[in-house]
Amino acid sequence: MPSVQWPGAIGSAPWRRDGQRLSPVTLVTMLGPSPDWFVGTNGLPLYEEGAWLQEVVFDLYPYDGGTRSANQWPLGGPRNDPAEAISVITEESGHLVGPAKMGTMTFTLIWKTAVESSTWAEAKAIPR
């Protein structure tokens, strides 16, 4: 997916999924130029009860990757050794971002072939 730059930019990219067993989507993208903050999802289903879903929308909340201790935008800062556990950024964590959602991700079914083994879809990222 192309880079989505703030404020208010929208990025989208089509992709192909082969077979229903590969329907869950896992994706991560960094909040640049942060030290280790990111948004994403893990195992988001696009195929349920024998059919491809027409549209799936989910909110993007910020996470801290636990690899840097600096609470600043520029890359760098001291490394956490060992790395801390990945965590959701909350109001109590005192980060520069969050805890509100950073945007939404929408997966839209574009078309599927006559044999349901191949499907084209599009993902769109929309900042809040």
Image (tube, rainbow, N blue to C red):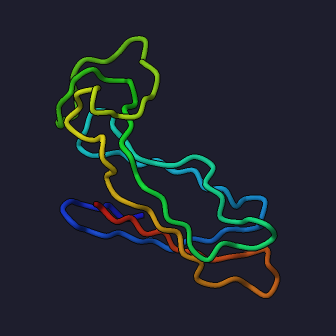
- Assign the C terminus to one quadrant of the image: bottom left
- The percent position of residue 38, horizontal first and vertical second, equals 37, 42
- Say if 111 sits above or below 119 in the image: below
Taking the spot 38% from the left edge, 64% from the top edge, the residue there is 125
In the rendered image, the residue lying farthest to the top is 81
- The percent position of residue 33, horizontal first and vertical second, equals 23, 43
In the picture, measured across the screen, residue 10 lies left or right of residue 40, that is left
Q: Depth check: give the residue in front, 120 or 62.
A: 62
In the rendered image, the residue lying farthest to the bottom is 114
Taking the spot 34% from the left edge, 50% from the top edge, the residue there is 101
Q: Depth check: give the residue in front, 88 or 80.
A: 88
- Assign the N terminus to one quadrant of the image: bottom left
- The percent position of residue 59, horizontal first and vertical second, equals 43, 55
In the picture, measured across the screen, residue 76 lies left or right of residue 54, that is left
- Say if 127 sits above or below 65 in the image: below
- Say if 110 sits above or below 68 in the image: below
